[in-house]
Image (tube, rainbow, N blue to C red):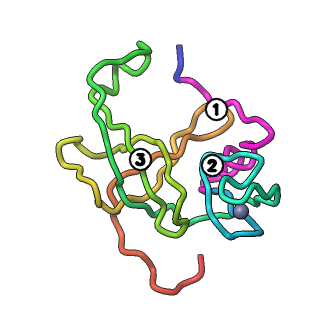
């Protein structure tokens, strides 16, 4: 048995295809310029259908977390305890990801911590997760 794999649909295909390349993408509304996640077919703020994928840096801030001590799927037992978190993306205000924090003991984490994305291969795609930031953000640099 292996861990669950992403099953993209029409709205989320760009997200999973980006993750497979090691890129984190969210949606930005072309009409009101708000960011959103998870992917959907309309802007949640203004109902425009002109929502477009944009690549973000992968830097984020820990908003909230909880620690799992029980595996509801046996395949996750080896990861216990693990951290489930809400992460705000630094360069996409309004986009908040439900994800895991990896490479960090849960007790050492707190809201406000700077994080960076990492990608765990899953099937043909990859799952974006976050770990404590290891490097300083570049200032004004292009990607
Ligand atoms: Zn909009």
Looking at the picture, how far across and down is residue 69, in whole percent?
A: 26, 23
Looking at the picture, how far across and down is residue 47, in whole percent?
A: 75, 55
Which residue position is annotated with label 2? 19
Disc marking residue 78: none
Give the residue at the far bottom of this rendering: 140
Which residue is painted at 45% across and 64% down in the image? 59
Magenta region: which residues? 4-25
Which element type, helix, strand or loop, lies under badge 1? Answer: loop
Q: What is the crowding at mark 3: few (fewer than 14 residues within 10 Å), some, or many (at least 20)?
A: some
* 9 w.r.t. 21: above or below: above
Which residue position is annotated with label 1? 6
CB of mark 2 within 8 Å of CB of mark 1? yes
Spatial separation of the CA atoms under disc 3 and disc 2: 18 Å
Spatial separation of the CA atoms under disc 2 and disc 1: 10 Å
Q: Quadrant where the C terminus lies?
A: bottom right
State the count of labels: 3
Which residue is painted at 35% across and 55% down in the image? 62
Q: Report the front residue among 120 and 34.
A: 34
């Amino acid at each position: 048995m292996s861990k669950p794999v992403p099953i993209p649909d029409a709205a989320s295909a760009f997200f999973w295809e980006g993750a497979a390349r090691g890129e984190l993408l969210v949606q930005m509304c072309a009409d009101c310029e708000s960011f959103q996640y998870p992917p959907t077919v309309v802007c949640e703020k203004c109902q425009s259908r002109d929502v477009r994928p944009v690549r973000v840096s992968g830097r984020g801030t820990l908003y909230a977390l909880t620690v799992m001590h029980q595996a509801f799927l046996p395949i996750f037992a080896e990861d216990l305890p693990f951290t489930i978190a809400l992460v705000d993306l630094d360069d996409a205000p309004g986009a908040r990801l439900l994800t895991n924090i990896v490479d960090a003991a849960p007790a050492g984490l707190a809201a406000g911590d700077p994080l960076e994305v990492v990608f765990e291969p899953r099937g043909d795609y990859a799952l974006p997760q976050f770990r404590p930031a290891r490097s300083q953000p570049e200032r004004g640099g292009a990607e």
